Image (spheres, rainbow, N blue to C red):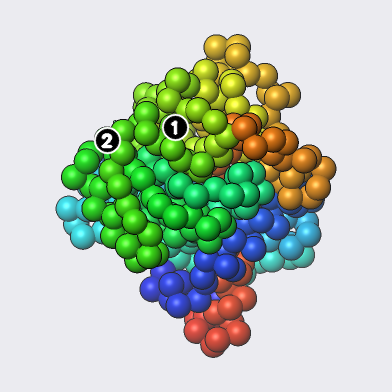
Amino acid sequence: MFIVPESEIAALIDRKSSFDAVESVFAAMSSKDAYNFPVIREAIGHADALYGFKSGFDRKSLALGLKSGGYWPGNEAKGLTNHQSTVILFDADTGKVKALVGGNLLTALRTAAASSVSIKHLAPENAKVLGMIGAGHQSAFQMRAAAEQRDFEKVIGWNFHPEMLSRLADTASELGLPFEEATLEQIGSDADVIISITASHDPILMDAHVTGGTHIACMGTDTKGKQEVDAALVARATVFTDEIAQAISIGECQHAIANGTLKESDIIELGAVINGDHVGRSSDDEITLFDGTGVGLQDLAVASAAVDLAIKKGVAIEVDF
Ligand code: NAD
């Protein structure tokens, strides 16, 4: 088996290879060549930690395996990242373990790639203003990946903790874009693309905030009880997702489904748009919303790409196992 340590990932896999891996696995999910297994996520009653597995199989690429990990809130005080994850890949022909891959940076790259794929396929073509809601660790990855899909002229941003907004300003400046702090009303009326990436449990972006044609990528809600967007806004939008089963249970759609304003059959897989089976955006003034819940197959796709590159570059550690 091969080991690809966390410390090697940054030099191996970039935004382009993450984007390509995620776009093709979304397409494979929609054509039923790839499927995710049920997610396990448990509060383990130790260190206040949430721990779980996301797993799946892609018959096209033969990626089989799982991402294991979770959230340890006390890690930062120990100089470690609170989110911890590791990917294990198996040989689909024999079941033998194939690779152990550091999954922390891969998680950020595959999450940013997912919203970036949604922007490519759903955002208004002439989008000029990018609105960011959230300024945590993931937000910088999200902004960099989004900026590759449209010729944005400006980034505007809001965060629950305004003292964190410097991350958005710094990332915009790295991309050569001006940044302005904005109210949620301004984001809703001025942004052509909005990304929400927070740990919120209450709606932040309300239905009344959003006017005109907009694409909203909801990326923070990945657990039951979390919410970033008003359920009425979800009900008004044309809704796309990575996986419908996750969207209605742990994603942003869970609330509009629960109050009966959205039906499961209203939700479209982003893969259907990638495969040409759904038109995607049908008019400039439409609101499209991508519920990016984060699926195990995304992790397997980027981890497989990282292992292939590590073997090619001679940095994968081979172990007799
Ligand atoms: P982080 O801890 O670095 O940042 C947290 C962000 O949430 C900050 O912007 C913070 O101000 C905001 N926040 C915290 N409490 C809030 C509240 N009560 N109301 C509104 N905002 C609040 O986290 P991160 O690594 O940037 O991750 C952000 C979110 O994205 C998390 O909820 C995480 O679970 C989720 N996530 C989703 C995926 C996916 O695939 N969909 C992948 C990775 C992370």
- Dot 2 or dot 1: first in sequence order is 2
According to the picture, the residue beneath numbered tag 1 turns out to be: 189
Mark 1 secondary-structure assignment: helix
According to the picture, the residue beneath numbered tag 2 turns out to be: 160
Q: Give the side of residue 182 with respect to residue 96, left or right.
A: left
Mark 2 secondary-structure assignment: loop
Q: Is any atom of residue 158 visible in this view?
A: yes
Residue type, label 1: Ser
What residue lies at 55% left-to-right and 79% top-to-bottom? Answer: 310
Q: Which of pointers 2 and 1 indicates the residue nearer the eye?
A: 1
Q: Is mark 2 within 8 Å of ligand 1?
A: yes
The picture places residue 182, in percent across and down from the top left corner, at 31, 39
State the quadrant of the N terminus: bottom right
Local crowd at mark 2 within 10 Å, few (<14), some, or many (≥20)?
some
Separation of marks 2 and 1 at Cα, in angstroms: 19 Å
Q: Is residue 57 above or below residue 243?
A: below
Specify the quadrant of the image occupied by residue 238.
top right
Decide which of 37, 133 is in the foreground and name it.
Answer: 133
Q: Is residue 78 above or below residue 99?
A: above
Q: Is any atom of residue 295 visible in this view?
A: no
Q: Are marks 2 and 1 in contact (CB under 8 Å)?
A: no
